[in-house]
Image (cartoon, rainbow, N blue to C red):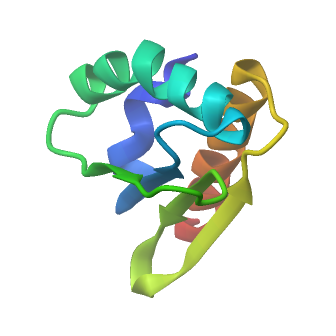
Amino acid sequence: MAWRGHLSQNLKELRILLCQSSPASSSARAFVERNYKDLKTLNPKFPILIRECSGIEPQLWARYDMGVERGIRLEGLTEAEIFKGLEDLVKVGASIKA
């Protein structure tokens, strides 16, 4: 999982949108609770924004160069699937730079 240390090289910003209490956001909350510290340790100056709003659909958004953004819906995904989605967004950032 070496790609986790390359967030700041391939992305400009990462945003996670979730609800504090809804069952639909439970896997997104678990992902943040278990992985935020490691991701931030590997990318200390990289902005990882956690946005909580009651009733919102859980989403993960990546911002790249030139304001390009890509997002994925997290509802119904497991924590492993969220990790795979994040990895795919990082790979997109690498291909945009190439």
What residue appears at the point 36 percent right and 59 percent down from the top-left corner?
13
Q: Quadrant of residue 74?
A: top right
Is residue 27 positioned above or below 25 on the image? above
Q: Quadrant of residue 71?
A: bottom right
Q: Quadrant of the C terminus?
A: bottom right
**Front position in the image: 94 or 39:** 39
Q: Quadrant of residue 75?
A: top right
What residue appears at the point 81 percent right and 34 percent down from the top-left corner?
77
Is residue 38 positioned above or below 48 on the image? above
Is residue 74 positioned above or below 29 on the image? below
**Front position in the image: 24 or 13:** 24
**Front position in the image: 15 or 1:** 15
Residue farthest along the left direction in this orientation: 45
Left or right: where does residue 53 sit relative to residue 45?
right
Position in image of residue 38 (x %, y %): 34, 16
Residue farthest along the bottom direction in this orientation: 66
Position in image of residue 4 (x %, y %): 47, 27
Position in image of residue 1 (x %, y %): 58, 16
What residue appears at the point 23 percent right and 21 percent down from the top-left corner?
41
